[in-house]
Amino acid sequence: MRIFIDKQSPKAFHALVQTSEAVRTVAAEAGLDRTVVELIDLRVSQINGCAYCLDIHTKAAVRAGESAQRLGVLAAWRDAAVFTPVERAGLALAEATTDPTDAVAQESAYETARQVLTDDQISAAIWVAVTINAFNRVSIMSKHPVRAHRGTPGEESGVTVSGG
């Protein structure tokens, strides 16, 4: 059984949570909609295969007004005409941040982002991707469990973790 590193080293985890809270404030101040932030969190978590963060951020996206259709096609966002130019720019930056070895993707993401996002929004989107990447690693290495939701299908369990 693995240790939950967030519980084993709570000061380090608390610092990560504080960073995440600061990043969410920066994103809001830059004018990034909460839905964009959740889409970034979800796309990065999909790439990293973090079930725990996918569970948390799916619930958060639904609370922010995200539709089942858009959540369902998020992994193929480039082929789905349901995302706005701002969302597409954020998703491209999220993917480029998650795989920093792909220089071509980074340049393409920046090129796309420059057309629709301000410098503050570009910075915020990258910070959102950086922090969710960190949370993904915490949850993956700790093997945080995903438990079935109680109640009817689609009903939230009410369990949340800051930044997760």
Image (spheres, helix red, strand yellow):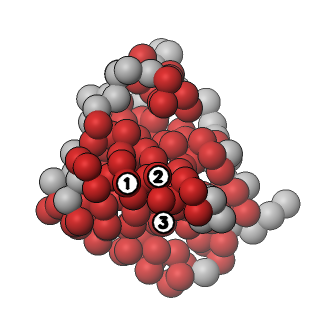
Instruction: Give the residue type that dot 2 points to.
Output: Ser
Pinpoint residue 127: horizontal percent, then vertical percent: 39, 66
Disc 3 crowd rating (10 Å Cα; few below 14, some 14-19, many 20+) is some
Q: Quick check: marks 1 and 2 in contact, CB under 8 Å?
A: yes
In what quadrant of the picture does the N terminus appear? bottom right
**Residue 25 at least partly seen:** no
* Left/right of residue 136 with respect to residue 108 in the rendered view: right
Would residue 79 be visible to someone looking at this image? yes
Residue found at x 67% / y 45%: 49
Residue 133: where, in percent of width, then height?
55, 61
Q: Secondary structure at mark 1?
A: helix
Rate crowding at label 1 as few (under 14), some (14 to 19) or many (20 or more) other CA atoms within 10 Å.
Answer: some
Q: Residue at x 38, y 20 (%)?
A: 81
* Residue 130 numbered tag: 3
Q: Position of residue 160 (x, y in %)?
A: 43, 48
In front: mark 2 or mark 3? 2
* Residue identifier under label 1: 111
- Which residue type does callout 1 highlight? Glu
Seen in the picture, residue 92 relative to 162 is either above or below; the reply is above
